[in-house]
Amino acid sequence: MFPNVGLLITAAIASSVAAIDSSCNTGPIQCCDAIATPSSATATNALSLVGVAVSGVNALVGVECSPITVIGVGSGASCSTTPVCCEKTFDTQLSLYQVVGVNCSPITI
């Protein structure tokens, strides 16, 4: 009975790590307070802080993001806002829109 439980736990952990690796191959998964379309006021303001032209953004923009480490993936992973995979992130060095993610896609962790 107990060896089967260990096998089940190992399989569950392996499948969750594999799912995350395949979901975000451009960098760490980000937990963003908001995601916005490139033409929205929030995204336009955030992009201007990091010097990215709206025309160069093809997908959602993540605002106020922080990385979720692989160690935190699984039962310990927590993102009370929006988990996303972003093509690139920028640190504004400001308190407003501190980390901005570009070309983001919402994911499930």
Image: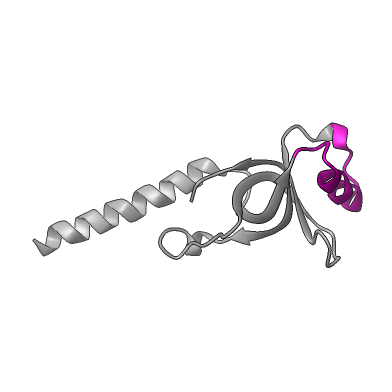
Q: Which residue corresponds to the image point at 86% horizontal and 65% vertical from the top-left?
A: 94
Residue ID at (82%, 40%): 40
Indicate left or right for 71 with 84 as reference: left
Q: Position of residue 80 (x, y in %)?
A: 57, 60
Residue range corresponding to the magenta coloring? 37-55
Q: Which residue reaches farthest left?
A: 1
Give the answer, above or below, for where 21 lies relative to 75.
Answer: above
Name the residue rendered at 52%, 62% in the picture.
Answer: 78
Residue 27 lies, with reference to residue 56, above or below; the image says: below
**Residue 52 drawn in magenta:** yes
**Does the segment drawn in magenta span residue 93?**
no
Q: Nearer the viewer, residue 94 or 34?
A: 34
Residue 45, image x, y percentages: 88, 49
Q: Residue at x 48, y 62 (%)?
A: 77
Q: Position of residue 30 (x, y in %)?
A: 63, 54
The residue positioned farthest toward the front in the image shown? 41
* Displayed quadrant of residue 55: top right
